[in-house]
Every structure is written in structure tokens, then in C-alpha cells.
Image: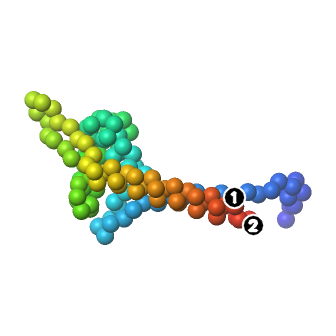
């Protein structure tokens, strides 16, 4: 076994990293990607424009919105089909609350990881 003296002079500091998501009985309800999609729908007023802005297919974005709306007691996104006047999508009050909830839990989660990282040693 080769022992390198210089390796012992550099302190090892470790940090916890992690991801979380909120699940419903049916499966994933909210996570980082879904919240990003909701925020982009708010910004762009359209599921297709939101999807393009995060390089996601419209089909995948629509499927995510559909699952979030289905798994929630009330829809997170309200949409109108296209046509002469155009379509569009907007967040409902529940959608806004879902984003706020996710960010509040994220802040708690990050604080936990930072605090717990302070005592990580080997």
C-alpha cells in the first residue's frame, strides 16, 4: 500500500446535495422540472412557448401539465385551444400556490442539507 503524506494535509470537506419531489398517490406531482415548466407557462402564456424555452417537446410538456392537473384537487394550469383568436395557457391560483409550496420546501431542504453538511467527516 502506498501512502501519500500530502494527501493527509488537505482537509476533506464534504457537502450534501440532493433533489426532492412531491408525490401524490398516483406518482410524481411536483419536482424541479415541473415547477420550471409552470414558471415558464406563467412567463410565456403558452404551453408550447414554455416547452420551447426549456427545450422540451410540446408533447412532453402537455403530458406533464395533464398529470399535474389530474393529480391536483383543482387544476394548476388553465388552457384554451388555438384558433382564430389563438390559444394560451395560464396558471390558476392553485398553480401559483404549488410553485410557492415547492420553493418553500426547497428552501427548507437546502437549509437541512447545508446544516447537516457542517458535520460530515470521515
- Say which quarter of the image contains residue 115: bottom right
Mark 1: give few (<14), some (14-19) or many (20+) Cα within 10 Å. Answer: few
- Say which quarter of the image contains residue 81: top left
Residue 20 seen = yes
- Say which quarter of the image contains residue 39: top left
Counting residues from the start of the chain, the first of labels 2 and 1 encountered is 1
Viewed as shown, does residue 14 lie left or right of 43? right
Q: CA distance from mark 2 to mark 1?
A: 9 Å
Vertical position of residue 122 compared to residue 38: above or below: below
Q: Which residue is mark 1?
A: 14
Q: Position of residue 83 (x, y in %)?
A: 11, 33
Q: Are marks 2 and 1 in contact (CB under 8 Å)?
A: yes
Q: Residue at x 27, y 46 (%)?
A: 91
Q: State the quadrant of the N terminus.
A: bottom right
Viewed as shown, does residue 7 lie left or right of 20? right
Residue at the far top: name it: 84
Q: Residue at x 16, y 41 (%)?
A: 80
- Which element type, helix, strand or loop, lies under badge 2? loop
Q: Residue at x 25, y 49 (%)?
A: 92
Q: Which residue is mark 2?
A: 122
Amino acid at each position: 500500500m502506498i501512502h501519500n503524506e500530502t494527501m493527509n494535509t488537505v482537509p476533506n470537506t464534504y457537502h450534501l446535495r440532493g433533489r426532492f419531489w412531491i408525490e401524490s398517490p398516483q406518482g410524481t406531482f411536483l419536482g424541479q422540472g415541473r415547477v420550471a415548466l409552470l414558471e415558464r407557462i406563467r412567463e410565456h402564456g403558452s404551453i408550447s412557448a414554455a416547452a420551447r424555452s426549456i427545450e422540451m417537446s410540446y408533447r412532453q410538456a402537455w403530458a406533464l401539465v395533464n398529470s399535474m392537473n389530474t393529480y391536483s384537487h383543482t387544476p394548476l394550469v388553465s388552457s384554451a385551444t388555438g384558433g382564430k383568436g389563438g390559444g394560451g395557457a395560464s396558471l390558476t391560483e392553485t398553480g401559483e400556490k404549488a410553485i410557492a409550496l415547492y420553493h418553500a420546501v426547497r428552501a427548507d431542504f437546502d437549509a437541512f442539507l447545508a446544516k447537516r453538511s457542517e458535520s460530515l467527516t470521515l
